[in-house]
Every structure is written in C-alpha cells, then in structure tokens.
Amino acid sequence: MRIKICGITSYVDAMTAIEAGADALGFVFYEKSPRYISPLNAQKIISKLPPFVEKVALFVNESAQTINTHCKESGATLAQLHFTPTDELVNALEVPFLKVSRAKNAQDILEYKNEYRIVDAYCEAYGGAGKRINIEWFDDIDCSKIILAGGLDSSNVASLKKYGFYALDVSSGVEISHGKKDSQKIQDFIKNAQ
C-alpha cells in the first residue's frame, strides 16, 4: 500500500515520514489552510530530500500559470488539484497532476473513474479536516486507481486493505497540531497500512 503524508511544513517531519516508509509527501500551497507552506519554504525542504520520493503540491482554485510556476520553484513533482479544473487549465499544465473528487455521495466516487485520482470526503473547507468518507461506498467498486483521503488514522487504516486502494493520503490523522506531525502516529499508520 502506497502512502502519502500530506501537510508537511518542516524538514524534520518530511524525513520522519520518509524514514517510516512514506512514498509521497504533500505540501499545501493554499494560503487559507493552517498547513500552508510557501513554495520557497517547500523548496528548502524538497532540495534536501532523498531521491524516489514523490513531492506533491496541493492547489485550490489556482491558474495553470501559478501551478506551473509554484511546482517549478518548489521542486514539486506532482500537482494535486483540489478543485474542478477546466480542460483549458489541464491542457496548460506543464507538470503531472492528480484530480481530487470531494465526494458528497456514492456517485461522486466514480468521478474521473478512468484516471488515478484522490477521493476525499466533502467538507466546506479544503483538505485536512479529518472527515471520514462512507467506506461502504467502495464495496464492489474497482479501487485500484483510487487514492483514499479523509479521516484516516492508525486505528482504521488496517480495515481498508481489502478494498485494494492504490494509495492512502493522510494529514490530520498523524498530527500533534495543524502542520506538526507526530513521529509515532506516522510510524503506526504506515505499519498498520502495510
């Protein structure tokens, strides 16, 4: 099971996640988030990371130009689009990207079903609210291209193995406070996910 630890704001937390076995790190470039990090500060972390770790930049309602610029400046390798992008925006992106479905109902999890995508629980705020999606919606669904997010922690992650998700994306479930990760929670989450 692949794991993304999102909401990274420090080099220490980044290395803690990597050493525990995380495959990807998320950097939130959404200024209204309590986990916001500037592209410059993200670059200071990313430039010191070991190879073969995906560096994901999270965006909300930004232009293709901003997404391209911030990814280039920070060294992010993948853009996470936490909004519904237009075809025009997608065509103008110069970086690989993932779309996010903010699911209100079972039908929403089928959005972008032919693409690798993140499926998160819908909430008014964007990301990291710790709200859990209704897991029964995934019964009898091909989950092999779904990266599941929302309300995950070490106590519930083992129960997800049977669904065959491509990956899991966790933020608040491994935190001490917004943007500050807990080493033990990260280790427990990854161990229980495997």
Image (tube, rainbow, N blue to C red):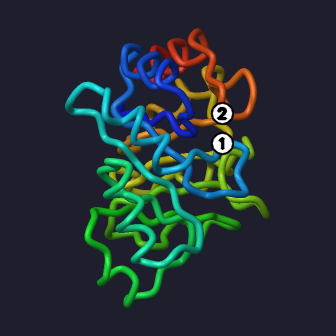
Mark 2 surroundings: few (<14), some (14-19) or many (≥20) residues within 10 A: many
Q: In the structure shown, which secondary structural element does the residue marked by tag 1 occupy? A: loop
Residue, x 39% and y 61% (percent of image)? 98
Q: Are marks 1 and 2 in contact (CB under 8 Å)?
A: yes
Disc marking residue 186: none
Extreme residue in the left direction: 51
Report the quarter where the N terminus lies. Answer: top left
**Which quarter of the figure has residue 17?**
top left
* Mark pair 1, 2: CA separation: 5 Å
What amino acid does circle 2 point to?
Gly
Mark 1 surroundings: few (<14), some (14-19) or many (≥20) residues within 10 A: many
Q: In the structure shown, which secondary structural element does the residue marked by tag 2 occupy? A: loop
On the rendered structure, is 114 left or right of 153? left
On the rendered structure, is 2 left or right of 173? left
Residue denoted by label 2:
179
Give the image location of residue 30, x and y in percent. Answer: 61, 58
Residue denoted by label 1:
35
* First reached walking from the N terminus: tag 1 or tag 2: 1
Residue, x 34% and y 59% (percent of image)? 116
What amino acid does circle 1 point to?
Arg
